[in-house]
Image: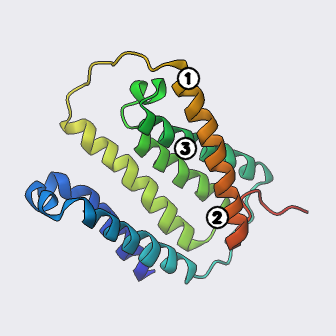
Amino acid sequence: MIQVLAGLALWSGAHALPRVAPGLHARLGRAARGVVAVMVVLGLMIRGYGAQDAAPRFAPAPWAWHLNNLMVLVAVYLFAASGMKTRAAAWLRHPQLLAVALWGGAHLLVNTHWAAGLLFGGLAIWAVAEMALLDARAQIAVASAPAPVGREAAALLGAGAVFILIALVHGWIGPNPFGAMS
């Protein structure tokens, strides 16, 4: 549990650094971001999560797996849409953070053990809090020109491909993203 909590604290602190200490953030530069991300995500969050008791507290409803996968697919699309500056990204204020919140909530539907609640719930709460903090200090942006339809299609196709890749990796490392197939 300590590793997961430390990972969440470092994740939150690293993302708050540009607002809290912009000078230090600028001095550390882009190279530090990758090192911190690898340490936090791979080292603390994933290892800490894997080391926890994964005994489910209750069985998720059968429909929860379908809703989980739909929410993750939408989250992957929102993340892609943000990077590609699509219409959805222009319409939503924080598509990447909304993607993290959806992803975390989706995982809470089907992972019913304490470590899941801590990791996925913690990241979802972080994303919602980050959106609130950004909204509290940001000016309302003027809507930009709509993105070309081709960019929307590329984001949708890319999201579908990444979702399939995520499902394959999940199957490879152990957790079946489609629930118990019986």
Image location (x, y in percent) of residue 181: 86, 61
Depth check: give the residue in front, 31 or 117. 31
The answer to whether the residues at label 3 and label 1 have Cβ atoms under 8 Å apart is no
**Is 125 above or below relative to 145?**
below
Query: Measured from the top left, where is residue 153 in percent x and y?
Result: 60, 27
| Of marks 3 and 2, the one in the foreground | 3
Read off the residue under disc 2.
Answer: 111
Residue bearing the label numbered 3: 75
139 on left or right of 120: left
Give the quadrant of residue 6.
bottom left
Residue 146 can be seen in this image: yes
Q: Secondary structure at mark 3?
A: helix
CA–CA distance between discs 3 and 2? 17 Å
Q: Which residue is painted at 26% across and 24% down in the image?
A: 141
Question: Rounded to the nearest whole Å, what is the CA distance between mark 1 and mark 2?
Answer: 36 Å
Task: Relative to 117, say whether 99 is above or below.
Answer: above
**Amino acid type indicated by mark 1:** Gly
* Front position among marks 1 and 2: 1
Three-letter amino acid code at the position of disc 2 = Asn
Mark 3 and mark 2 in contact? Answer it, CB < 8 Å. no
Residue carrying label 1: 150
Q: CA distance from mark 3 to mark 1?
A: 20 Å
Q: Earlier in the sequence, mark 1 or mark 2?
A: 2
Q: Is residue 92 above or below residue 32?
A: above
> Closer to the N terminus: mark 3 or mark 2?
3
Q: Residue at x 45, y 34 (%)?
A: 84
Q: Secondary structure at mark 2?
A: loop
Classed neighbour count for the residue bearing mark 3: other residues with Cα under 10 Å, few (<14), some (14–19), many (≥20): many
